Amino acid sequence: MVAVVDGGLEEVLAAQRWRYAGREVCRLAAGDWVHLSGAPNALVVAEGLVRVEGLGAAEDLAHGDFLFVPQQVRFAVRALSEATMWRIQLAPLSAAATPLPERVLLTEFERHAPLAATMFRHLAAECSDPEGVQGDRVATLIASMALESWFTRGCAPKRWLLRVNEPDLARAVAAMHADPGREWTVEALAKVALASRSGFAARFQAATGLTPGRYLTSLRVERAQRFLAEPDVSVGNVARRLGYRSETAFGRAFRRHTGVTPSEWRRNARMPS
């Protein structure tokens, strides 16, 4: 089945088990680099401005911003000004049933997750004896609270909790994601799934809560938002890449889904926060 399981977030949070593996207070001069790899890391910027590179698009983190990297990936932090970071290293104590994201980035961590921010500061900079059970429990709570805040604030990818356990439906979903601009019909998707048209449509809607057509529209709009963030891509070009026969048809679909036109979305996305 392909589904966002009821209570899916709660299941993910309940499954979190982390071991505290170390801590560090990093005091950096402007231009200094910190290269991180190996263990999962979580950090909070205590003061200054830093740039995180190596996790997709570079991100600038300022005072109070939080980054959790739950996977073993290499990345680097460069101080853009004099800066202080609190960092803790973690190790997973159990395998995640749902793959965790490559990064969890939260601005204004203390305002949105004050208890987690307080525990993080205590563990990273103040706790006299973070070893053992206490450190593990606090690290697990911080990871769980950060994931919950990241999800409820709308920062998570839209299909982060999507479970794919039925191969025929999974093939159809994968085909749409591989080529969202194709003129996918229910018949064409049913053929990919090696299923009958009526049986496929009913099972797809039961699993995802959407008809295949609505799922495709949602996927196209999500992909359009990524394309519109590119500086030199026109709205018409985005419409053509996503299979719309006219810019007008694309604009109507985009507005129904987001409440704004593609041009308005692009202007809003480029406004400084």
Image (spheres, rainbow, N blue to C red):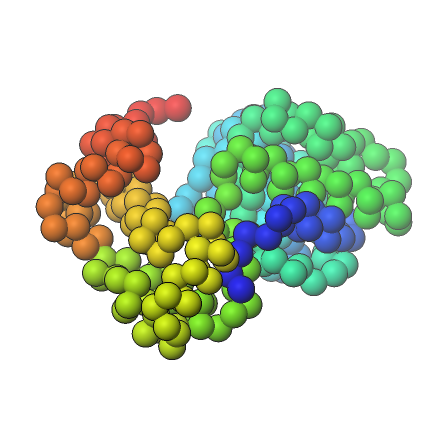
Q: Nearer the viewer, residue 225 or 117?
A: 225
Q: Residue at x 45, y 67 (%)?
A: 170
Q: Residue at x 52, y 70 (%)?
A: 166
Identify the image quadrant of residue 185. bottom left
Above or below, 127 relative to 171: above
Placement of the C terminus among the 4 image quadrants: top left
Q: Position of residue 46 (x, y in %)?
A: 62, 28
Residue 75 in sight: no
Q: Residue at x 56, y 26 (%)?
A: 108
Q: Position of residue 89 (x, y in %)?
A: 70, 49
Residue 167 in sight: yes
Above or below, 82 relative to 31: above
Identify the image quadrant of residue 64. top right
Q: Position of residue 201 (x, y in %)?
A: 39, 61
Residue that protrudes farthest toward the front in the picture: 198
Q: Position of residue 10 (x, y in %)?
A: 68, 45
Q: Nearer the viewer, residue 220 or 267?
A: 220
Q: Would residue 22 be found to the left or right of residue 174 on screen?
A: right
Q: Nearer the viewer, residue 153 or 28?
A: 153
